[in-house]
Each structure stands twice: as structure tokens, then as C-alpha cells.
């Protein structure tokens, strides 16, 4: 007998949609048929869509910050919020701090996550100190152990790598077949702009956006692509915000280069005007993230890229800090200059509802494309497919049931995170996850997280399909 049968479902994958029943046993999908037979538990999915559980491939949880700043979400609250948003897998970052062993960073991150995850997790690495020991021994060993992706930064004082370091890291990634994620913003240009703005007395949160114009993102994107071409390694440009960096990515793709791209909800639902707050006041700090939201033309460009394949994945870049907190957005100095406002906004729970509503419900993208962007492509890009990211026999029974007609107004009162606000307050969406199933067990249903904080497991990953694997 089956453990679970999902009946009357309209099943949607990245390739097609069918009406069938789903039979689940021992956490896996074992049959998809017109009638799967008897089961110990049944779910009637009439009127709902059965989609692969969301994979949020870019989230920050319990990440060390320095300067007295504390991230709002740890693993328990962050993965709880993820489950409520229709996600079954999240991929946060194990950050190597300067002077720290990469292995020590990974071990510490596992200790922070152990027994506290409502959904499955797998870690990217963040390389900030590419010493000979890290590049020659630690990174290759960790890639072989299933940590097959890592992120590098082209900005931020405590994270930036110079061009020589980037090239060395890219070369190791090529040799070991690891996917490189690149935060592409030009460090020196941002420092120059920030200094000019501060000297002119332009210090409100809004000027964070002015200090990081699209030109600094465009230049860094071009430079990252050039380095990838030189070293012959696949890269993913993350959180792309507008037309200028998109055109660099499109140029690379037209030339057949192995360049992938990610965008995020803030670039289709927010603009730089949100950083103005009520009257160029500190309220704008709620929207400070990097790259910043742009303008309406940038939103239009992002939608073009979501439709035409420029973008491969759609992630939240969930990076939460409490607004009314001296250890969050209101840290010492933040009210004197945008430069000290912690960068990042919450979004793990609202990622898929926003894309579904603005994309599928408004006819901008189809259901299959929605599934590709939010589940299938992340699984393929980061070595989890076909175990994750699809509804197919043999795959983990990670399924989200969606009500495509449900209308919801996003508000902080609905959120399951530990942040004290949502930047999408008041946004009306159509389409909402009503049940999240992780390996055959319901972990969220009708507004309530039902799975335990130890429901999730850690996932070792294979090689990205970007390498042809």
C-alpha cells in the first residue's frame, strides 16, 4: 500500500502538465497514474496545482555579520518561513571569514543548522580568503565531498576579491567542476560614489541606490564574464537588477559561453523610489539591498529576461535584518549615512507567490516556465536533479499544492520569519501555496507550519549540469 496518494491533481513540471494521481512511498514518488490505488493517507487536490517543491538557491541564514549586526533569521525561523512559501529546499551560504579555514566555516555552519531545519538544505560556500591552503587543499576536498558551488564577491570591504584572486579561484572551479556564483558590483566605483554622496550631504537610505548605479553592475558583470571566458569555467551572475547587466549576459549567451543568470523578487516588485521612505527618511532602510531595485524600465527588462531565457533561476536573496533593532537596520551609524545600513531584505516566504502572481496570473510567463525558474533549473544548476526539482517517478516527493485563484494581500502578520517587517507589505497577489509536502510528509498547510524543526535533511550534491553532468 502507498503511504500517500494525491488525487485529482493537475501536475505541472517544467516540460508539461497532466491530470493524474501521485503515489508516494518511503518519501519518494513511486507512481503517477490515472488511479494509483489505495493509500494510508489521501489528499484531494481538486482545483489545485501540484508543483515541484520550490528550491530557493540563494538565501542567507544565520550568517556572521560583524560590527554588532545580527541577522534576523536563523535556520529554524528561516526554513519555517521557506516551508510556508512553498519551498522544500533552501541553499544558504557557509561564509569563510578572513583568516578562517574554509573547513572550519563549513563545520560551524553545520553545527548552527543541525536539528533546526523544517526543509531540506544544502550549502554553498563563500570564499573571502583564497589562500594557497584553501585553493590547493580545502576547496578541492570540499567540492569532492558534495559542496559543488561557491560564491565570490566583487565588492564589500570584508569580502571583495581582486582580479588576480578571482582568476585563481575560477581556475580551481574549472579544474574541480564547481559552479561559481558571482556578486557583480564594482568595488572601487562604489567607494568613489559613496564618498562623493557623503561629502555632498546626501546620506539618507535612498542614496544607497545612487551609490550603486547600473554602470557599476554592468562593468563588474562584463569583467566576471571575461574572467570566466579566460579560465573556461561556468559562472552564475546572481541578483541581476536591470537591463545593463542583462545585456552583458545576453552577449555572452549569444556567443555560446557557459554563463547563467539569476534575478529576484525585488527587481520586479520594488523600485529605487521605495528607498525614499515616507519623505527621504530612515523608513527607506527597509529596502536597502545590493544591487538596489532600479526603475520601471529595469522591471520591464527583467520581465523580458524571465520570458526569453536570459534568466535561468529566480531566487529570493533572503537576507533579513530587523528594522527596529540596534543590531539590525538601525545599527549605530545607520541614521548618519546609508553606508552603514545593513544590506539585505527578507523574501524567502514571498518569492514564489510574487512571481506566480506577477508572472503566471498576469500572463507574463506560463506555468511551466514558473516551475523551471523556481525549482527545476535550480536543481539542475546546483547538482540536485533529478532527485529534486521535478515531479517524476523516483524523485523525492517534494510537492507544493497551489491555489491559483486565491487572492492574498501580503502583510507582516502572515509571515513566518523572525524579521519585523516585509518589504512587500500591502502587495496584492493572486495564487498562493496551500500545502507544502516534503518527502511525502506535510510540513505546511493552510497557514500553519506542521512539520518539526528537524524535518529537513542535509543534501550532498553532484556536479552542476552546466558542466554537462
Image (cartoon, rainbow, N blue to C red):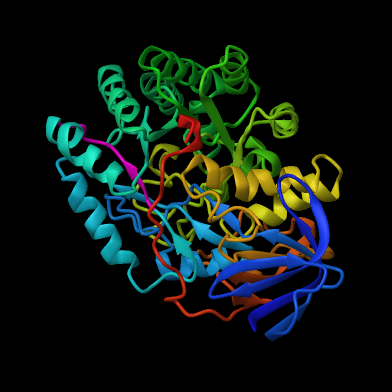
Q: Quadrant of residue 422?
A: bottom right
In percent of width and height, residue 277 lies at 62, 46
Is 229 magenta? The answer is: no
Magenta region: 123-131
In percent of width and height, residue 82 lies at 55, 63
In percent of width and height, residue 449 lies at 58, 77
In the picture, the quarter occupied by the N terminus is bottom right
Q: Is residue 180 above or below residue 143?
A: above
Residue 120 shows in the view = yes
Q: Nearer the viewer, residue 241 or 457?
A: 457
In percent of width and height, residue 353 lies at 71, 56
Asked whether, in this view, residue 30 is left or right of residue 175, the answer is right
Q: Residue at x 56, y 63 (%)?
A: 396
Q: Nearer the viewer, residue 429 or 234?
A: 234
Q: Nearer the viewer, residue 334 or 4?
A: 4
Q: Is residue 309 above or below residue 422?
A: above
Q: Nearer the viewer, residue 413 or 23?
A: 23
Asked whether, in this view, residue 345 is left or right of residue 242, the answer is left
Q: Is residue 441 above or below residue 285?
A: below
Residue 281 shows in the view = no
Amino acid at each position: 500500500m502507498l503511504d500517500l496518494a494525491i488525487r485529482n491533481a493537475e501536475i505541472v513540471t517544467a516540460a508539461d502538465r497532466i491530470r493524474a494521481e501521485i503515489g508516494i512511498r518511503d518519501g519518494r514518488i513511486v507512481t503517477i497514474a490515472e488511479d494509483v490505488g489505495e493509500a494510508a493517507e489521501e489528499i484531494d487536490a481538486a482545483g489545485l496545482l501540484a508543483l515541484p517543491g520550490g528550491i530557493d538557491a540563494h538565501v542567507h541564514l544565520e550568517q556572521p555579520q560583524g560590527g554588532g549586526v545580527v541577522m534576523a533569521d536563523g535556520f529554524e525561523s528561516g526554513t519555517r518561513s521557506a516551508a510556508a512559501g512553498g519551498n522544500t529546499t533552501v541553499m544558504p551560504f557557509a561564509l569563510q571569514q578572513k583568516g578562517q579555514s574554509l573547513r572550519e566555516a563549513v563545520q560551524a555552519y553545520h553545527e548552527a543548522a543541525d536539528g533546526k531545519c523544517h526543509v531540506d538544505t544544502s550549502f554553498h560556500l563563500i570564499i573571502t580568503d583564497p589562500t594557497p591552503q584553501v585553493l590547493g587543499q580545502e576547496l578541492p576536498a570540499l567540492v569532492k565531498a558534495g559542496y559543488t558551488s561557491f560564491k565570490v564577491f566583487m565588492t564589500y570591504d570584508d569580502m571583495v576579491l581582486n582580479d588576480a584572486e578571482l582568476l585563481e579561484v575560477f581556475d580551481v572551479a574549472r579544474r574541480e567542476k564547481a559552479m561559481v556564483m558571482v556578486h557583480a558590483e564594482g568595488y572601487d566605483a562604489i567607494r568613489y560614489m559613496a564618498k562623493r554622496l557623503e561629502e555632498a550631504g546626501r546620506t539618507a537610505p535612498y542614496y544607497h541606490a545612487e551609490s550603486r548605479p547600473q554602470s557599476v553592475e554592468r562593468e563588474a558583470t562584463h569583467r566576471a564574464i571575461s574572467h570566466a571566458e579566460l579560465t573556461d569555467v561556468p559562472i552564475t551572475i546572481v541578483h541581476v537588477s536591470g537591463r545593463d547587466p542583462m545585456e552583458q549576459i545576453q552577449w555572452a549567451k549569444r556567443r555560446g559561453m557557459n554563463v547563467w543568470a539569476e534575478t529576484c523578487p525585488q527587481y520586479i516588485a520594488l523600485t529605487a523610489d521605495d528607498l525614499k521612505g515616507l519623505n527621504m527618511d530612515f523608513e527607506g532602510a527597509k529596502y536597502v539591498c545590493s544591487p538596489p531595485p532600479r526603475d520601471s524600465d529595469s522591471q520591464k527588462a527583467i520581465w523580458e529576461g524571465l520570458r526569453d531565457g536570459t534568466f535561468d533561476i529566480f531566487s529570493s536573496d533572503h537576507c533579513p535584518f530587523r528594522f527596529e533593532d540596534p543590531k539590525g537596520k538601525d545599527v549605530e551609524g545607520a541614521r548618519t549615512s546609508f553606508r552603514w545600513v545593513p544590506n539585505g531584505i527578507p523574501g524567502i516566504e514571498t518569492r514564489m507567490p510574487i512571481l506566480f502572481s506577477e508572472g503566471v496570473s498576469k500572463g507574463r510567463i506560463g506555468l511551466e516556465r514558473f516551475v523551471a525558474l523556481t525549482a527545476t533549473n535550480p536543481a539542475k544548476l546546483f547538482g540536485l536533479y533529478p532527485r529534486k526539482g521535478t515531479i517524476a517517478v523516483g524523485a523525492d516527493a517534494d510537492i507544493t499544492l497551489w491555489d491559483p485563484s486565491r487572492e492574498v494581500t501580503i502583510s507582516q502578520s502572515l509571515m513566518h520569519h523572525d524579521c519585523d517587517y516585509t518589504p512587500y507589505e500591502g502587495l496584492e497577489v493572486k495564487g498562493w501555496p496551500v500545502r507544502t509536502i516534503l518527502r511525502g510528509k506535510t510540513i505546511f498547510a493552510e497557514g500553519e507550519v506542521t512539520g518539526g524543526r528537524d524535518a529537513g535533511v542535509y543534501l550532498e550534491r553532484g556536479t552542476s549540469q552546466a558542466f554537462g553532468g
